[in-house]
């Protein structure tokens, strides 16, 4: 079985059910997204498809995510870039939304506004991820960065670049 997605007249796919499930978890497929099991088939809202309804229910968990506040942190704007190749995308998105308002920009890129820090986000979100997953968090409000599992060379390069005087 495969799925196709129609966006602004363009058809993308085929995608496996596992890929589509991950897209739901990442926020790339929403209830209003047009999907079809055939490239030339009739496209309909994802919310009308049984599999997607189940996936949306799983993502929402039937409840609102409890919001977390980092003591002493003021609201800040974050850019989060993740390469999540494991099946943890939905769990990651849920964990991320606990720290503020989240907007999916594109696959693997989110904006977050919330009262926390890049270090707290990295520490908390890394618990959700697997060893092959990667994460970069930029605190655009306070000129800070935190990352997870990017490798020693990237680690040093980020430290060198971020530490340079203006």
Image: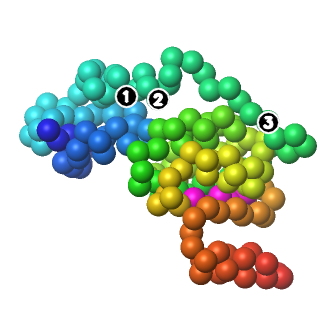
Q: Is the residue under label 1 in contact with that under label 2 (CB below 8 Å)?
A: yes
Q: Earlier in the sequence, mark 3 or mark 1?
A: 1
Where disc 2 sits, the SS reads: helix
Expressed as whole percent of the image width and height from the top left, the position of residue 2 reads: 17, 41
- Residue positioned 81% across, 59% down in the render: 142
Q: Is residue 18 visible?
A: yes
Q: Quadrant of the N terminus?
A: top left
- Residue positioned 41% across, 45% down in the render: 87
Find disc 3 in the rendering and name its residue: 69
Mark 3 is surrounded, within 10 Å at the Cα level, by few (under 14), some (14 to 19) or many (20 or more) other residues, namely some
Spot the residue most to the top: 62
Q: CA distance from mark 3 to mark 1?
A: 28 Å
Q: CA distance from mark 2 to mark 1?
A: 6 Å
Expressed as whole percent of the image width and height from the top left, the position of residue 159 reads: 72, 77
Mark 1 is surrounded, within 10 Å at the Cα level, by few (under 14), some (14 to 19) or many (20 or more) other residues, namely some
Find disc 2 in the rendering and name its residue: 59
Q: Earlier in the sequence, mark 2 or mark 3?
A: 2
Q: Please indicate whether residue 16 sits to the left or right of residue 39 in the image.
A: right
Where disc 1 sits, the SS reads: helix
Spot the residue most to the left: 40
Where disc 3 sits, the SS reads: loop
Find disc 1 in the rendering and name its residue: 55
Closer to the camera in the image, 123 or 7: 123
Picture quadrant where residue 145 is located: bottom right
Q: Which residues are magenta?
A: 135-139
């Amino acid at each position: 079985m495969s799925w196709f997605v129609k966006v602004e007249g363009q058809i993308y796919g085929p995608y496996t059910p596992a890929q589509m499930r991950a897209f739901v978890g990442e926020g790339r497929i929403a209830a209003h997204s047009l999907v079809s099991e055939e490239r030339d088939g009739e496209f309909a809202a994802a919310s009308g498809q049984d599999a997607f309804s189940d996936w949306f229910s799983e993502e929402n968990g039937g409840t609102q995510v409890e919001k977390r506040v980092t003591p002493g942190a003021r609201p800040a704007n974050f850019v989060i870039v993740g390469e999540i190749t494991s099946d943890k995308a939905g769990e990651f998105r849920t964990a991320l939304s606990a720290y503020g308002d989240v907007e999916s920009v594109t696959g693997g890129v989110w904006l977050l506004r919330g009262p926390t820090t890049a270090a707290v986000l990295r520490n908390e979100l890394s618990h959700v991820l697997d060893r092959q997953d990667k994460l970069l968090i930029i605190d655009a409000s306070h000129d800070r960065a935190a990352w997870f599992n990017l490798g020693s060379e990237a680690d040093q390069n980020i430290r060198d670049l971020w530490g340079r005087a203006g």
